[in-house]
Image (cartoon, rainbow, N blue to C red):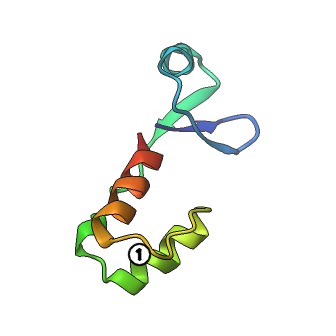
Amino acid sequence: MWFLNKETGLKWEVHNKDLIKRLIIHETYEVIKERDAIDYSKMAYKELIEFAKTKGINAIGFKKHEIVEKLNGLEE
């Protein structure tokens, strides 16, 4: 979930559920729209490899479904 710090203008992505609950209540932070989920299964194999590189995954030699699983694992 994404939060905007109203005082500093910085945007934060928070995954910890306890911290999310605290930030929702706090007056300094505002929930902002979450990024749309990417459907990796619709991407071409070469696109997946390049995208995985940007996320720090060495995907060379993996099959398409294996790369998709790794990328989906990063979002959780």
- At x 37%, y 52%, the residue is 72
- At x 34%, y 54%, the residue is 69
Q: Nearer the viewer, residue 51 or 58?
A: 58
Under circle 1, the secondary element is helix
Q: Which residue is mark 1?
A: 48
Where is 15 relative to 54, above or below? above
Which quadrant of the rendered structure holds the C terminus?
Answer: top left
Percent across and percent down for residue 64 are 31, 71
Q: Residue furthest left?
A: 42
Q: Residues within 10 Å of mark 1 (few under 14, many from 20)?
A: some
Is residue 59 something that shows in the picture? yes
Choose top left, top right, bottom left or bottom right for residue 23.
top right
Where is 55 relative to 1, above or below? below
Percent across and percent down for residue 36 are 34, 56
- At x 34%, y 61%, the residue is 66
Is residue 33 something that shows in the picture? no
Residue 32 falls left or right of residue 72: right
Choose top left, top right, bottom left or bottom right for residue 45.
bottom left
Percent across and percent down for residue 7 are 74, 34
Q: Amino acid at mark 1?
A: Leu
Q: Residue furthest front?
A: 61
Q: How many marks?
A: 1
Q: Nearer the viewer, residue 45 or 15?
A: 45
